[in-house]
Amino acid sequence: MLKLLKKKDFILFLFIVFVSLIISLRYPRFLTLSNLGDIFKDTVILIIVAIGQMMVIITAGIDLSVASGIALTGMSVGLLNQHYPGIPIPLIILISMLIGGALGSFNGLLIAYAFIPPIIMTLGTMSIYRGFVFVLSGGTWVSAHEMTDGFKAISGGHVLGIPNLFIFAAIIIALFAFFLNKTKTGREIYAIGGNELGAKYVGVNVKKIKYYVYLLSGVIYGLAGLLWVSRYASAQNDTAMGFELQTVAACVIGGVSIMGGSGSVTGVILGALFLGIVYNALTVTNVSPFWRMAIAGFLILIAIIVNTIAKKRTQYMMIKRRVF
Amino acid sequence: MDSNISSILSSKSSFICELREIKKYFHGVKALDGVDFRIRPGEIHALIGENGAGKSTLVKILTGIYQPDSGDILLDGKKVSFPSAHESQLQGIAAIHQETSMFPELSVVENIFMGHPIKKSNNISLDWRAMRKKTKELLDRLGIILDPESSIKNLSVAERHLVEIVKALSLNARIVIMDEPTSALTMNEVEHLFNIIRQLKKEGKAIIFISHKLDEVFEIADSYTVLRDGHFIGSGRLEEVSMDELINMMVGRSVNQMFPKIEVELGDVVMEVRNLSKFGVFNGISFKLLKGEILGFFGLVGSGRSEVIRTIFGIDDFDSGEILLDGKSVKISDPKVAMKMGIALVPEDRQLQGLILKMKIRENITLPIIDRIAKSFFLNYPKEVEIAEEYGKQLDIKAASWEDAVQSLSGGNQQKVVLSKWLATNPRILILDEPTKGIDVGTKAAVHRFMGELAEKGISIIMISSELPEVMGMSDNIIVMHEGVITARFKRDEATSEDIIKAATGLVKVE
Amino acid sequence: MGLSLSKDRVVEFVTKWEFLLVLIFIFVIILNSTLSPYFLNVDNILDTTFNFTEKAIIALTMMFIIICADIDLSVASIIAMASVFMGYASEVHGVQTSGLIMIAILTGIGAGFLNGIIITKLDIPAIGVTIGTMSLYRGIAYVILGDKAYTKYPKSFAYFGQGYIGSSPIPFEFIVFIFFAIIFGVLLHKTTFGRKVYAIGNNRIGAKFSGIKVDRIRLILFTLNGLLSGIAAILLTSRIGSTRPYIANGWELDIITTVVLGGVSISGGSGNVFGVIIAIFLLGFLRFGMGLLNVPGIEMNIITGFLLIIAIMFPNFLNNIKERMLKRETY
């Protein structure tokens, strides 16, 4: 477990460096510190939510409701801040995580205990949660001037010169890297995805852990919802539309197998950064932002195909080792 | 002489585990009918029986996967029960060669400690260093050379077995169950495994060794228990019994009585396979099949027989070689093409490969020929009923109606459905992969009789079997495979069980 | 003969999925007619079908896909892509109606075929692939159209989505639906193709060993799904009269919900066309009723989402009740 950079992650890292260099040759503006800073800032929320998505995918599930969850929690705390500006910021942060946790918990309950396939359950809650955004907002938005400065500073502010967003990300990354690598439950998540029956046989409480994975994903995107509306100083009905696909893309590019059982925080960070770089390159090269969706879809396909072919190749190499 | 531990303990005659009058039913069929079993610490006890005798059911009861319908389980003289697999594990029972507990993407260390990791003093974070150290210790103790960090998916079958043994030790198992552990192992790996088993015996573990390779049983085990058709037949010490007596207990009749072979005049070559090879699976397979012949393929699990057959039937592809039918080279790209050429395959895994369990008997029987009997793409219900009737009666399938789902049938009747389905395709060449596995004696005999009748009608049969008496009794010619190559060929009269077994375990030079 | 109404048989019938579906359907009709006195008029009912016919025809092929134990999340995106291609051809190049139809059909076939090829030839789970193509296809629509709209379509084009058969109150779209319902209903229940689809959905390996060309059939199903999405694009675009890149947004949820609500098991191998047709009308009228209550579209999705989840939970729930009432022994 002390392998800091697995071979797959390292290759992705090199690829990212390579792509960045290529882009900067044509557009030197790309590699400036301020642009790199922008890339990180734009990607932070994706990294955070993708970590939650990764945990779900590792258990051989998927969470398509993350974007709607971001929108719903974002709208909730946005409205709270608008109507009750006196609520202290730490409490708002807590509330966002509680709401997210509740949303994730609903997913987890039915997936783990009622055996509803994750794809169906989260397809359903994707619509349900998005619908509730509309119910809550009554069709209106919460805009910048309706939010307190303290609220907007959650994402916009600095502590000791470091942007708050980075601090949030660092905490989440550290927490979950620890959780997934260094705790019993964390490793059992991998076991469930790798061989659910086998995990049950060795005493893993499969149902409980599956429930918690969706709960945690919810807590994470609850926080992300707050960060999102704070950063863009706006809570809209179409906030984070389509974002769930980006989280899946970040995971798949980062080497998380869609079948479950494997994946790393490092990989996901790299995958998210790759996506962030590609999006930023679009801006820098003056390509319209409308390309994002197509590119995300294309990258998902390529990444899944490459991963699958690579897996089959290693199986073939294994056989080669055992020739007569 | 073995260690003092076992002699002291056996003189005290204290059993670490006892099973008394265990009964287990499935859908009204008796899988186990009042079985007894006893084992002492430091004893290597062989559990012997043919396919379907009830060995794996017994093991599943011991490991908590099944619950006995009646009977007692005792550990150290006290009655216990295992409501779950985990419970059985907690009580010190470990089973290896059950891929069910391996996590391919995770490392050796993780697989061993999943579910019971070593934690640091704060009781939250995992102590990987301690787990790695303990893994190394256990590996060294058994003389196994493995990198603890390697992923299970990269290990060979033999290495995975070893990891499972280490896992059993890490759980402080007192009873280790090994179910056919030497299938797919090379000679050297088997020796290594046996040394480890002897080491475990020295440590006072009780080992239940399930195998139908009787030569190995005699080499490694101290005592035996024989099951047949769910009944307890006998047990005792291996030094007091001969192989023939064991076979007799397993089979219940002499070989000749069981398989009344109908002598058939063999015709011309209907199929020839030349140098068929698939990288890493089988190599240089060549043989001829005559009209009306029953060609037996014997070998251990993993010898590559099923893989060869699947290639002939078009399920898998191959790298080099040819297949000729009636002297002409053919390309069989998928099962549909094979069917058109008159080849049929009754596969090894009845429920997964041979049937669509939730579908009706009639639908299953007519599935391969659905297009043949169709009225230009439309289903031909009357014809389907007619065919189901015809074969159902011919093979004497016992079911309330042809509209019942296949999954409601017993193992024997299910196999009859599979046979019907393929006979309905009017094959010239019928391939049977372990046709009587897990079937009661009565149906078995019926299947054998039926095979004989088919051969008489001029159908050529290839039969894969791991049951020596069946192969020797039914085949006109026998081909033995080992690790993907043909190691021996015998004509019916020339074959002796010793020669066949030697060829199957690789003790004979490759041709 | 005697009394055939034994308690067991009554319980069997009452817990049959289609029966319950019909009950709920009747309830929805009653609800709608209390909301609007004009509802029970034949002309009006036929007019309500405009709103759900396009989804309905895709549900017919999605039914095959789910029975075959696969799934296709990209259908709505195929509609978007086909619609954008038609709009581009019409507005920018003046292509006429027959040309537009060809474009949509070819797009649908091409997109479905691509799905199918990647899934079958590379052996990648349909979930992963169609999540990717869902994004890719709609992404292409956005790339071409951005935040604008195509509104210039030939006059004759409007007939498909807005026209009626002769002077009758029957919409052309509805006839298209009836046509496909018959074709696919017969295909599923009366042909060898349908039997093979059920077999694959029940046990893919067993089907392969039985001589069924599994990959070819799956490829055909994905291509068909794409084809019908293309046809739906024609009808929808014609009905709305314009194209925006978010056209048919979220429709994949509605279509999958329809099929699952219709009694098709998500794990494959079971279900029939009658249940799906009842579900089509049930959901269609339900949406119409909510529209009468002025419920916004986004909020209607809440109901659809819940329906999907309940529809999956219910078979297990029903089975438990059935087992308990019939006092059957389970091993």
Image (cartoon, helix red, strand yellow):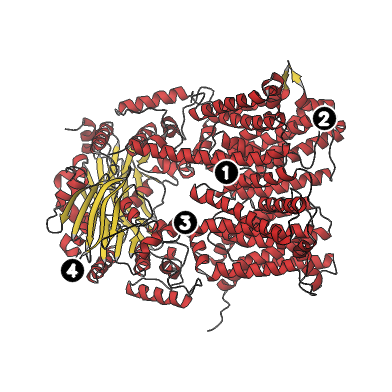
User: Label 2 is placed on what type of residue?
Assistant: Ile
Q: Amino acid at mark 3?
A: Arg
Q: Position of residue B68 (x, y in %)?
A: 39, 53
The answer to whether tags 4 and 1 share a subunit is no
Question: Where in the figure is residue C152, as x and y percent of width and height?
Answer: 80, 54
Please tell me if label 2 and label 3 are on a single chain. no
The CA span between labels 4 and 1 is: 58 Å
- Identify the mark nearer the N-term, 1 or 2: 1
The amino acid on which the numbered mark 4 sits, given as a three-letter code, is Val
Look at the numbered discs 3 and 1 and tell me whether their residues touch, using CB distance below 8 Å: no
Whole-angstrom CA distance, mark 2 to mark 3, is 57 Å
Binning the other alpha carbons within 10 Å of mark 4 as few (below 14), some (14 to 19) or many (20 upward) gives some
Q: Which sits in the foreground, B10 or B358?
A: B358
Left or right of C281, for residue C4: left
Circle 2 residue: A87
Distance from the alpha carbon under mark 2 to that under mark 4: 94 Å
Which label sits on residue A61?
1
Q: What label does residue C204 carry, if any?
A: 3
Which residue is labeled 4 in the image?
B264
